Amino acid sequence: MSLQIGIIGLPNVGKSTLFRALTKKQVPAENYPFTTIDPNVGVVEVPDDILPQLSKVSNSKKIVPAIVEFVDIAGLVKNAHKGEGLGNKFLSNIREVAAIAHVVRVFNDPDVIHVDNRVDPGQDIATIETELALADLETAKKRIENLSGKAKSGDKIANVQLPILEEIENRLSQGKDVLELLKQDEAAKLIREMSLLTGKPEIYVANIDEAEISKADEIQKTLADKTGKKPDDFIVISAKIESEIAELSAEESRTYLESLGLKEPGLNRLIHQAFSILGLQTFYTSGEMESKAWTISKGMTAPQAAGVIHSDFEKAFIRAEIINWQDFVKYGENGCKEKGLLRIEGKDYVMQAGDVAHFRVGV
Ligand SMILES: Nc1nc2c(ncn2[C@@H]2O[C@H](COP(=O)(O)OP(=O)(O)OP(=O)(O)O)[C@@H](O)[C@H]2O)c(=O)[nH]1
Ligand SMILES: [Mg+2]
């Protein structure tokens, strides 16, 4: 399962600066043998305050965090959908990712050229989104052409898909995305199958001047107002500050963050948000050997979660023993058993964020 976040945006907005800062947190590839080694792909640890606490209680030899992958994609320009500026290649890079981190330039630096010679985040977002919509429109039109004949001759699938495609075409021609249609199962299936760009979950990363970092909340609100999006859709950072923090030791970065009045690096927020828009969450296992965060999709049941640990475990699942992580940290595993804080859950149990789990399986 490749669940990558593509970093996209206009040229020169700070995508690669951000990517390099992220990859300073890059995990050693040998810990994750199935991850591709590609200079444009960064395998990044998901920051996790719970793991060290579990590890301490269990006296674990090793901590294994969850990971998320970021892909640095080259800048898109106007008319990318017509192939401008290697547009087709970059658009196909975006088709392969599961979600999008859209970097928007807010910083003013006369030394860094803006492709349109002005800093206007709202307009820049519109430029990129228009390209994505036009690329999707072409994909939809081609598909409609292919299916029309089949639909007339009574092809079942074509007759199901054609009205959906027409709806997609309709929305895109009006400059809308197709996110709304994801609520319908058939449409969602088709949108994923066609890898439509406007059907991917997206976060906006506003790259602001380092001197403005104390005004981050204000800027977030202004951006939301200007673009008609929600403030939470934006993560406001300074790529420059992030790349500096990434060079520092843990101790130094704490002092530096404090001096800027920040609680945590902006990258941590970005990584968490990225994880969340992919629809992912973690559960934990913790013992002497290791404390580990396992990645599952939200809504997965206990047997499915067990199947992530080992594919045989899903079928062989008997029961799950679940302890809430706060209880685990407070009383330890045995303490929780004595206090009745260990729950026995069956095959219908839906995993909750922060569960510490033991699966009993019949193999
Ligand atoms: N002042 C300032 N300059 C920045 C910031 N972020 C990036 N830059 C500069 O902007 C220039 C372009 O940054 P990149 O990170 O290479 O931009 P990019 O989006 O990857 O550009 P392309 O790959 O060409 O699309 C570099 O000279 C960076 O040093 C920032 O937060 N503040
Ligand atoms: Mg770049």
Image: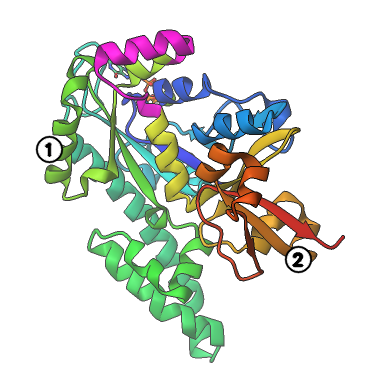
* Left or right side of 110 for 72: right
Which residue reaches farthest bottom? 154
Q: Does residue 43 appear in the picture of this structure?
A: no
Number of numbered markers: 2
Find disc 1 in the rendering and name its residue: 222
Q: Is residue 321 above or below residue 232?
A: below
* Left or right side of 176 for 298: right
Q: CA distance from mark 2 to mark 1?
A: 52 Å
* Residue 317, position as x, y percentages in the image: 75, 64
Q: In percent of the image, x 45 and y 15: which residue is there? A: 246
Q: Earlier in the sequence, mark 2 or mark 1?
A: 1
Q: Does residue 215 appear in the picture of this structure?
A: yes
* Residue 149, position as x, y percentages in the image: 50, 82
Residue 242 sits in which quadrant? top left
Q: Nearer the viewer, residue 295 or 124?
A: 295
Ligand 1 shows up in the quarter that is top left
Q: In percent of the image, x 33 and y 10: which residue is there? A: 256
Disc number for residue 318: 2
Q: In percent of the image, x 21 and y 27: which residue is there? A: 106
| Pair 2/1: label in front | 2
Q: Give the magenta-colored segment's residue range.
A: 246-267
Q: Is residue 263 magenta?
A: yes
Q: Nearer the viewer, residue 333 or 60?
A: 333
Where is the C terminus found, in terms of image quarters?
bottom right
Q: Amino acid at mark 2?
A: Ile
Residue 312 sits in which quadrant? bottom right
